[in-house]
Image (cartoon, rainbow, N blue to C red):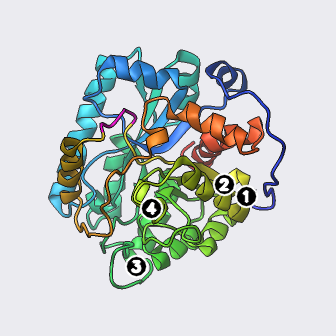
Amino acid sequence: MHRRDFLWSLPAAGAAAWSVAQQKRTRTPIIDGLGEIHVEYDMKLVDEIRASGLRGCVVTVGNPALQGASAFDDMKREIDAYDAHVKAHPDRFLRATTVADIDSAVDRNRIALLYYTQNASPVGDDVERLRVLYDMGVRIIQLTYNTRNLVGDGCLERTNTGLSTFGVALVERMNAMGILVDLSHCGMATTMEGISGSAKPVAITHAGCKAVYDHPRNKTDEALRALADRGGVIGIYQINPYLGPNERNTLDDYLRHIDHAVRTAGIEHIGIGSDREHRRIPDTPEEKQKLIDELSRLRPVTASTFRWPFFLTELNHPRRMETLATALEARGYKPPDVEKILGGNFRRLFADVIG
């Protein structure tokens, strides 16, 4: 079903913030379409995150800047670490490979982790290797990272070509297997051909709106409309330098991206893809250096990419989903629409593609 016709009109505010109890009543999970919940988090922090209502989180496995055999090896190492972490803490986590697993997380007060690789590079040059990734639990694959790979061009590549012949074959096989195609870091031509070339709806798990702020990582209105027309979902990220020109953008700047995406694509196609850690990040020189070190492993890194802090102050805590629910309702979104943005739309997409 194409849902772009269900466009948002600003209603009156006043409903109570979406609670964990309401989530259980409606069975609409709160999902971060791309977040960071690291195995190093202590259980006190994990319990704060669970208290926010988060029940599904797509997590990156592997360094997306790597190519060749090292890309697969690094992905496997991180999957093994997450698998061990889930096994060690079954009262708090579960590994999700189906929507039923996310629904179970709602019922059991767990966080379902969905494995996602931010580059198709672990597949190498053989689409048959998708079966290996699938058997390891990967259910979402981004076609390219920032630069060119065998599939197409990334958003920081100097050229703007679409899908390669291998890329077309990869998308076809992902569709057949129930692996969700993601286009967040893809160049514009690869994004548009990824949408049109997929037989199933696709995701832009973490990006913003180019019409609100012109940044290489943000998507055009044309892409948002095309995504919606095919039943896809975009998760709006919470990365300060990608949301606006200010040194420190605010929650209001972030919500402007959500508002624009809703007006352009429709309420049925917008979600949250924070692309940030679910912890309180200290605003210190030490944390700034840690981020610089992290980005240095995700080349290419340019001066325009880095601006401290990456986080938004109002959302820099483990209960950010509650903050967002309150802010969206204060902005005039009705509770059913808040449910869609905070997880319902991603759940529907996962059901349509992953099963």
The numbered disc on residue 246 is: 4
User: Could you tell me the amino acid type at mark 4?
Assistant: Asn
The numbered disc on residue 269 is: 2
User: Could you tell me the amino acid type at mark 2?
Assistant: His
Marks 2 and 1 close (CB-CB < 8 Å): yes
Q: Magenta stretch: dominant SS?
A: loop
Out of 164 and 42, give the one closest to the viewer. Answer: 42
Crowding around mark 4 (Cα neighbors within 10 Å: few <14, some 14 to 19, many 20+) is: few
94 left or right of 106?
left
**Relative vertical location of residue 49 with respect to residue 231 in this rendering, above or below:** above
User: Secondary structure under badge 2?
Assistant: helix
Nearer the observer: mark 3 or 2; the answer is 2
User: Could you tell me the amino acid type at mark 1?
Assistant: Gly
Q: Cα distance, mark 3 to mark 2?
A: 29 Å
Q: Cα distance, mark 4 to mark 1?
A: 27 Å
**x%, y% of residue 303?**
27, 69
Residue corresponding to mark 1: 266
Marks 3 and 2 close (CB-CB < 8 Å): no
Nearest to N terminus: mark 3 or mark 2: 3
Nearer the observer: mark 2 or 4; the answer is 4
**Region in magenta:** 278-282
